[in-house]
Amino acid sequence: MRTRTLTAVGAACALLLAASACGTDDEKEDGGPSTGGGSQTLELGVITPMSGPAASTYGEAARTGVEARIAAYREEGGECADVEIEIVDGDDASTPAGALTAAQRLVQQEDVYAILSSSANLFGATQFLTSQAADVPILGDVTDQSPEWRQPGNNMFPAQPVPDPEAVYSILGEYMAAIGGTRMGGAAFQIPASQGALEAAARSAEAAGLDVGYLNTSVQLGSTDVGPIVLGVEESGTDVLYLPITFDTALAVVEGLEQEGVELAGVLAATGYGNDLLDNPLAIDAAQGVSFSVGYAPVSLGTEATERLADAVRDQGVESGIPGYAMSSGWINADLFLHGLELAGCDATQQEFIDALSSDDTYDASGLFPRPIDFTVADQPESCSYFVTLEGEEFVTVEEASPVCGERID
């Protein structure tokens, strides 16, 4: 399925473009693949779950984030704002096999210029993408944690910093200790990114002087059957919880613990920061006091970069201006694409795009990251996060931890 963005017609065109830029698919100059910018239409593939259990978390929200960033860029008159961009959907069906099928179709049938990934299942396609599609730029949120994201010199570029999965950073452990935790526990999905995040958090907690209690790394993706997790936390004496899982599942854990009367020093969720939570009164009640780690500057900081994001999100109908995880993923992925296009030149070939971004060390998500990503090295020198806590109906910035950066622990 194709979705027009910068060349949309009718009401959508009035929202996204100046009237003079509107057109139809018939205006594309040739029927071949889009290998450069300029007056051509660049076809931009987006791989994300549009069906299956992960669709409610990603899907339309991830694509909307891409559309919002491109629309904001056009309105600001960016250097390559005259380049027309067409989004081509790639549904990974919430499975690694589905991600491979989507990648093959986008490359072999749709001839896309580049692919943006908001998919925890992209690891099912990375071998294909780095071998048979090595001339196609791949940019993504690295939630699949494929090792190819860390390898400089290929065609895969992380839109968010991706640490060595074997590395441990001090941030999470120190934060859990600061909020009064003494025994850390958590739950993870049966996917490498989620499992790796929990294991690294446990080692960080140990380095900060905490004991490690209940750890569950085999939760089914999208499941809300959390009875065993609640029981494990209660019986182990765990008093601070880290949950690198989707917020639907994390919220079920929090509610289950509250129903059983289990008191914790704190709960830290890797996802859930966003308007989706604020739109759900029941979730607001259940998540009071839950903290969230955010890899980019939260809207509550009120910087130029966060205001740009908030304004664009409000234009998409989100009153709070706070994107959910999937929407922010799409936004940052698209932002990296636009950054690379400006580096390489608006009419750059795919190989020129890859070459330009491979030597870049300046990308900071247009001001949303506390440190730029250096694409010339495998590992960033430190890891940084922002922390916010839900208080009432607002995400309140944790002042001492916005951001907080930590070096790798040996």
Image (cartoon, grey):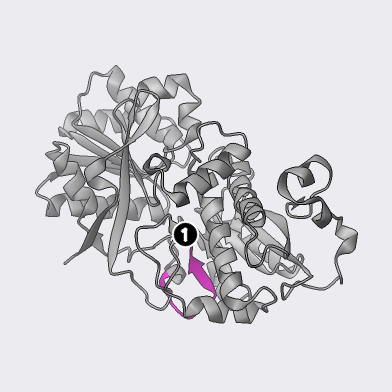
261 relative to 252, above or below: above
Q: Residue at x 15, y 38 (%)?
A: 181
Give the image location of residue 311, x and y in percent.
55, 42
Amino acid type at circle 1 is: Ala
317 relative to 90, above or below: above
Give the image location of residue 150, x and y in percent.
41, 71
Q: Residue at x 43, y 36 (%)?
A: 247
Q: Which stretch did the figure color magenta?
A: 150-159
Looking at the picture, tell me which residue is in the foreground, 101 or 354. Answer: 354
Determine the secondary structure under disc 1: helix
Q: Residue at x 29, y 47 (%)?
A: 402
Looking at the picture, tell me which residue is in the foreground, 161 or 241. Answer: 161
User: Is 349 left, or right, of 191 in this rendering?
Assistant: right
Looking at the picture, tell me which residue is in the foreground, 3 or 223. Answer: 3
- Work out which residue is located at the far left of the displayed protein and give it: 209
Magenta stretch: residue 154 in it? yes
Give the image location of residue 119, x and y in percent.
53, 53
Looking at the picture, tell me which residue is in the foreground, 269 or 261. Answer: 269
Q: Main secondary structure of the magenta part?
A: loop
What is the total number of numbered labels drawn onto the structure image? 1
Q: Which residue is mark 1?
A: 365
Q: Residue at x 20, y 56 (%)?
A: 170
